[in-house]
Amino acid sequence: MKTENKSHAEKGILSAMDKLIGLISFLFVVVLVMSYFLIFGFPKFSIGTAAHKDKDVSGLVSITKDGAAPVSSGNVWMAPDTADIPKDETGKQIRYGRSLIVNTSSYLGPKGTVAKISNGMNCQNCHLEAGTKPFGNNYGAVASTYPKFRPRSRKTESVYKRMNDCFERSLNGQALDTASREMQAMKAYIDWLGKSVKKGVKPEGSGIETLAFMDRAADPEKGKALFLSKCIACHGAEGKGVPLADGTAYQYPPLWGDHSYNTGAGLYRLIPFAGYIKNNMPNGATKQYPQLSDEEAWDIAAFVNSQSRPQGNVSRDWPELSAKPVDNPFGPYSDKFAVSQHKYGPYAGIAEARKKDKDKTITKKISK
Ligand code: HEC
Ligand code: HEC
């Protein structure tokens, strides 16, 4: 009886030891796996469709050619995929709107099939890839920020008004009726593009990048030499561009002259022009792979915008002088800087003086 009891107790101890050894080896394996992950990093489990993955790879977040650090924090706005435009009536309208942005001139240019109200350029000539290219003057922030207060008119403007600004200035043409099928379609497309952007947010990479200011004035002479080597292959030595054989649009759009944007247009200001070409021209350049230095971009901007172009109506712009951008090329100004410095820079001094004025006004208000 006793022996039997003993072996019973022994069995108990043995099975307890078995369990203990099991537990220890389990913990050992856990520690091993954890240290493997700590040393070699955790694997990334990606969710989402193949299309999403493709976008991540082609985006601006990947490593640059020379292995340098990525140029952005990875939050650059990406347009939704056109394959996801709904297949219903709304989708039809969105697709028509996109087509109007891409082929504006064939609908609304000098030989337009719908109306003849603009200069032959397409919205896409400046809002690249149908308004989707990162840092390519895209529409990523439009749906989320309009209607918005614009100091140029000192009014709250709808997206229709903003689009018509481009018709009247960038396309040196006439405004389009807000209720028209065309305007409604372009609005639908722009809303669809920005549908995932939270209200009030201006995503990274939307619109045009503002380059760091130079500490000298931009130089049209230097810009001319650069223009002759880097731009004439497409835009021509006279900046006239190259029309398509049937004359419905341009293969290479004009940079100045009668058929270009007028003096009221955004590109007639040095800061947007320099920022636009730095990340996009010669055509094919990107934020990630630019082909111009900042300095070259500023000097070319000065050259192009010193050439003649149609006069825009700017008489009612900027009722509040102190709100004028530093690079507005038309006086009067709220400051004492010369017109030429507003047109070509340097801008840091003007911006500094503006800031001091603002601070003074604020202190005055506070002490009252
Ligand atoms: C000659 C170049 C040019 C053409 C052509 C052009 N635009 Fe623009 N557009 C600009 C510039 C420059 C801006 C201002 C960008 C900035 O200040 O960041 C702008 C701004 C806009 C904005 C506001 C963007 C924002 O984020 O606030 C909209 C909307 C717009 N354009 C629509 C159009 C439409 C629609 C067309 C065609 C009918 C068109 N544009 C044609 C140059 C152009
Ligand atoms: C390889 C040809 C090519 C070269 C070189 C080139 N561009 Fe362009 N550029 C284009 C095309 C094409 C467009 C219109 C893009 C579109 O519609 O998708 C364009 C559009 C533009 C626009 C906006 C539309 C307009 O006409 O105002 C500007 C500004 C511009 N280019 C400036 C320049 C400058 C400055 C240079 C030299 C640094 C340059 N480009 C070099 C092909 C070129």
Image: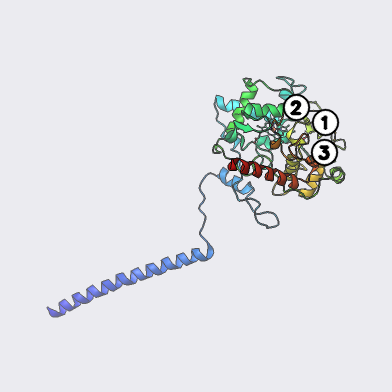
Q: Could you tell me which residue is drawn at 68 percent across and 54 percent down?
A: 64
Q: Position of residue 109 (x, y in %)?
A: 75, 24
Relative to 298, residue 156 above or below: above
Q: Is the CB–ligand 2 distance for label 3 below 8 Å?
A: yes
Pick the front one: 18 or 124: 124
The first of marks 2 and 3 along the sequence is: 3
Which residue sits furthest left? Answer: 1
The quarter of the picture where the N terminus appears is bottom left
Q: Are marks 1 and 3 in contact (CB under 8 Å)?
A: no
Tell which tag, 2 or 3, sits nearer the viewer.
Answer: 2
Helix, strand or loop under label 1: loop
Q: Position of residue 204 (x, y in %)?
A: 62, 44
Q: Amino acid at mark 3?
A: Val
Q: CA distance from mark 1 to mark 3?
A: 10 Å
Q: Which mark is residue 315?
A: 2
Q: Which mark is residue 309?
A: 1
Helix, strand or loop under label 2: loop
Q: Is residue 200 visible?
A: yes
Q: Quadrant of residue 224?
A: top right
Q: CA distance from mark 2 to mark 3?
A: 23 Å
Q: Which mark is residue 304?
A: 3
The first of marks 2 and 1 along the sequence is: 1
